[in-house]
Image: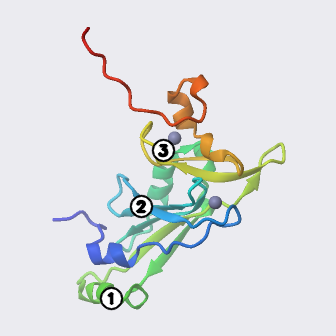
Amino acid sequence: MTRAGTLSLPLVRALRASEGRCYRHCDQGVRARTAATPLPGVFQVLACPSGVVSVAMYSEWSRRDASRSVAAFLRTRTRPASLVRATDLRLATRHGPELGPRAERLLERDPRRRPVRVVYWRVYPFQDAKGVDQRLFVCHRRAHTSPLFYAAPSEGGERACPGCAARAPRSSGARRRTAPQRARPS
Ligand SMILES: [Zn+2]
Ligand SMILES: [Zn+2]
């Protein structure tokens, strides 16, 4: 038995985020990446190779509005947590026809007649107190629990992850962190 709200595989496929171009940051494409959450549905982050987030989205097969649960989850994964504002979350309801024939059949057969509900989180570029353009970045590195969201200047923001900075020695700067060496008995 699956948890309430869990998406079956055809629905996950139907909801696979379309991968466009990075929004007003670079000319690279964005890639969708699925990240673990304690919620029953599927959480995806669309970001360009530098880590600038186009949108993060959470999909669930249910009638409920998961916005508050999604916001609570995002706050645990965002530095500072105040970057997550209720006004930047948008709820959409997806019905069968727009998700393709396989998903449509599944939704039609569902005795509970549930749609798929999607919560989108989009943070538009903004200026900090000094007038510097800031964007939402995501880091998926293993130095910390993935994903970790943070705001940083458009240029060089991929090196500013607060989670990686907290773990890595200062001198190593932007270098990729390697796995810790296990102490060997000498
Ligand atoms: Zn970009
Ligand atoms: Zn990081």
Q: Quadrant of residue 8?
A: bottom left
- Circle 2: element type: strand
Q: Disc 2, disc 1: CB below 8 Å?
A: no
**Mark 1 — residue?**
104
Q: Which residue is mark 3?
A: 76
Residue at the spot of label 2: 43
Residue lying at 42% horizontally and 73% vertically, measured from the top left: 117
Q: Nearer the viewer, mark 2 or mark 3?
A: 2
Work out how far the residue at label 2 is from the one at label 3, CA to CA, in angstroms: 14 Å
Residue 16 on image: x %, y %:
41, 73
Q: Residue furthest front?
A: 186
Mark 2 packing: few (<14 Cα in 10 Å), some, or many (20+)? Answer: many
Give the x, y percent position of residue 17. Answer: 46, 72
Residue at the (71%, 52%) spot, across then down: 154
Q: Are marks 2 and 3 in contact (CB under 8 Å)?
A: no
| Residue furthest to the left | 1
Q: In this image, 12 relative to 119: left or right?
A: left
The kind of residue tagged 2 is Phe
Label 3 sits on what residue type? Thr
Front residue of this view, candidates 143 and 171 = 171
Mark 2 or 1 closer to N-term? 2
- Indicate whether 102 appears above or below 83: below
Local secondary structure at mark 3: helix
Q: Residue at x 27, y 66 (%)?
A: 4
**Residue name at image x 34 percent, y 75 percent:** 13
Q: Residues within 10 Å of mark 1 (few under 14, many from 20)?
A: some
Q: Is mark 3 within 8 Å of ligand 2?
A: no
Q: Secondary structure at mark 1?
A: helix
Could you tell whether 43 is left or right of 167 in the image?
left
Asked whether the residues under the numbered discs 1 and 3 touch, taking CB atoms below 8 Å apart as contact, a structural biologist would say no
Q: Estimate the spatial distance between the alpha carbons at disc 2 and disc 1, rounded to whole Å.
A: 21 Å
Q: Nearer the viewer, residue 143 or 84?
A: 143
